[in-house]
Image (cartoon, rainbow, N blue to C red):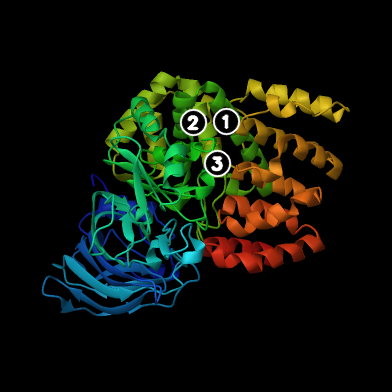
Amino acid sequence: MKKWILWLSMTASACQEKPTQTNDTATAKIAIENSDPHTYARPHLAIVKHLDLALKVDFATQKLQGKAVWTIENVSKGNEIIFDVNGISIEKITTGEEETPAKFTTDSANEFMGAPLKISILPETKRISIYYSTSPDATAVQWLTPKQTAGKKHPFLFTQSQSILARTWVPCQDGPGIRFTYNARIQVPKELLALMSAENPQQKNDSGIYHFKQTHPIPSYLLALSVGDLAFKSIDSRTGVYAEPSIVAKAAWEFADMGRMADAAEKIYIPYRWGRYDVLVLPPSFPFGGMENPNLTFATPTLIAGDRSLVSVIAHELAHSWTGNLVTNATWNDMWLNEGFTTYFERRIVEAVYGEKEMQMQEVLGRETLNGQIKEFGATSRDTKLKGDYAGRNPDDAISEIPYEKGYSFLRTIEAATGRENFDAFMKKYLSENAFQSKTSEEFLEALTSDLLKNDSELVKKIEIKSWVYEPGLPTNAPPVAAPAFKTIDSLIGIWSDGGSITGMAKRISSANERLYFLGHLPATTTAEKMTAIDNEFNFTSSNNAELQCDWYTLSVRHQYKPAYPGIEAFLKSVGRRKFLMPIYKEMKKTPDGLQWAKKIFAEAKEGYHPLAVQSVGALLAE
């Protein structure tokens, strides 16, 4: 770790305390200026540096039990260090190699932040051992029964620590600006394989005990564990796929371009710093498209479309190895530094591997998504700013397309103003100089202005930095986007709307992105009869592409296309990805009958959803 971004907790209890004085007034100043409202930790006073984790995975009780041994730096030489915990049962805490019992307290828990774990220490304390167990309801941990897996024989476990859920399975200083290395010893049933966001085994052993090492400092949200009946298949010398045995071959075929993507990424920016890059395909309940855990991306099985049409998600998660994992947002208010940069880098990788046409289509679809999100929030909403303001709110509830697509458009604006070659040179330098650090929006903008823009006031004015980062809506200088392939689709839709035939259109609108655009531009007056004609031509109801299924099923609910209803029910009961669940449930709840139908499906399906998806859908249907 070259540099730490530090802050004070913004919680009421922290504000009431008088900060301990330190010899480093500059560090204290940084801590105040770059406050993170989502952690109780006060790392400018005492900070974690390394974790030795030892856990036993107990499927019978649905608990993780063991100890977290933290190497710390008592920066202020004070008498306390604070961790974040949520629903964790503490057995005992000791300090030092001699394991002297330590005094500790926890305050009352906040609904989503949990509670501060305050541990008494001495000025010379360097080691803290926390003996604990997790709750079966730990939000970050999903325990799956055999019937919820592809193989149907063994249970499965996976964690999802982003944004502030690591504290539900490991006592930690749970903020993206606090980084640490870790080693782990994980004990699991002998028939299962354990994997983490670290150096991983590629096959099971006879003991059921697995050892892991992450030598690069990471924030807590990138701490990850999965346990299941898993097999490995190599893609090339540094990439491969883990999945349940029955689907590992399909997954490896689907993601066969991972090596090409990694090579392309290195040519655009700097060498990959994490050793191997592998992907773990999880059971359907995984609530996201992918999670960029270092060394091992966790991915949804909905990416396995059978035609490699959805692998841009893999490009996105791979890109995070540079923009996010290597250089990280310091707080969740700075999320765009992760997601906007990664969306930009993803599309550069897609352009290099699959061509400009594919990139252009994704760019147009992304801009339309952004415009829709801004319309939904309102053009003056604070949630359409790049620099977020999520204090007092769960950062998971505040996640939207804004940091992704508005962040992307901002970087495209910079690229257009400075030239791609100059922008790439700046990014190479920025990533190299800030590797394994966490940065704020202000720190990036300072580097941008002084290094790339050379403090040129006219160039700064042309880019409109303040409007992009600190003001709502989409600035007027957003670069135009266009995809020639979509103009042909606009023409075909116009001809059909005027009474022309749809027969043969599937041959002209053939790629997944072209079909997504087609569905997104159908007239609002589309009738159930016309939905029948579309389905007869394109067979959307029986599609294997989850992106197309989601858009088609949403339209089917809106236009009451009842032949798709069995497919909708099956889809909602078999897929746990929030991106697909929320639009369909949201459309269903617009009518009394639809709401009743949605509640019935949710009651039957929620057992197979991740707690994050249960929370999101449940809140939607209760409104």
Q: For the residue marked with disc 2, what is the amino acid?
A: Arg
Q: Is 17 in front, or is 95?
A: 95
Between the residue at mark 3 and the residue at mark 1, the CA separation in whole angstroms equals: 21 Å
What residue did someone put label 1 on?
363
> Which residue occupies the extreme right position in the image?
499
- Tell me the quarter of the image containing the C terminus: bottom right
Residue 416: x, y in percent?
50, 22
Q: Is residue 611 left or right of residue 588?
A: left
- Mark 1 surroundings within 10 Å by alpha-carbon count, few (fewer than 14), some (14 through 19), many (20 or more): many
Between the residue at mark 2 and the residue at mark 3, the CA separation in whole angstroms equals: 20 Å
Q: Is residue 383 visible?
A: yes
Q: Is 242 in front, or is 54?
A: 242
Decide: marks 3, 1 in contact (CB < 8 A)?
no
Q: Is residue 340 left or right of residue 526?
A: left
Residue 62: x, y in percent?
41, 73
Q: Which mark is residue 347?
A: 2
Q: Disc 3 on helix, strand or loop?
A: loop
Q: For the residue marked with disc 1, what is the amino acid?
A: Glu
Q: For the residue marked with disc 3, what is the amino acid?
A: Ala
Q: Disc 2 on helix, strand or loop?
A: helix
Residue 577: x, y in percent?
55, 53
Q: Earlier in the sequence, mark 2 or mark 1?
A: 2
Q: Is 438 in front, or is 456?
A: 438
> Which residue occupies the extreme left position in the image?
98
Q: Disc 1 on helix, strand or loop?
A: helix
Where residue 375 sits, quadrant-wise, is: top right
- Mark 3 surroundings within 10 Å by alpha-carbon count, few (fewer than 14), some (14 through 19), many (20 or more): some
Looking at the image, is mark 2 or mark 3 nearer the viewer? 3
Q: Which mark is residue 305?
A: 3
Q: Is residue 328 left or right of residue 486?
A: left
Residue that appears at 75% across and 40% down: 535
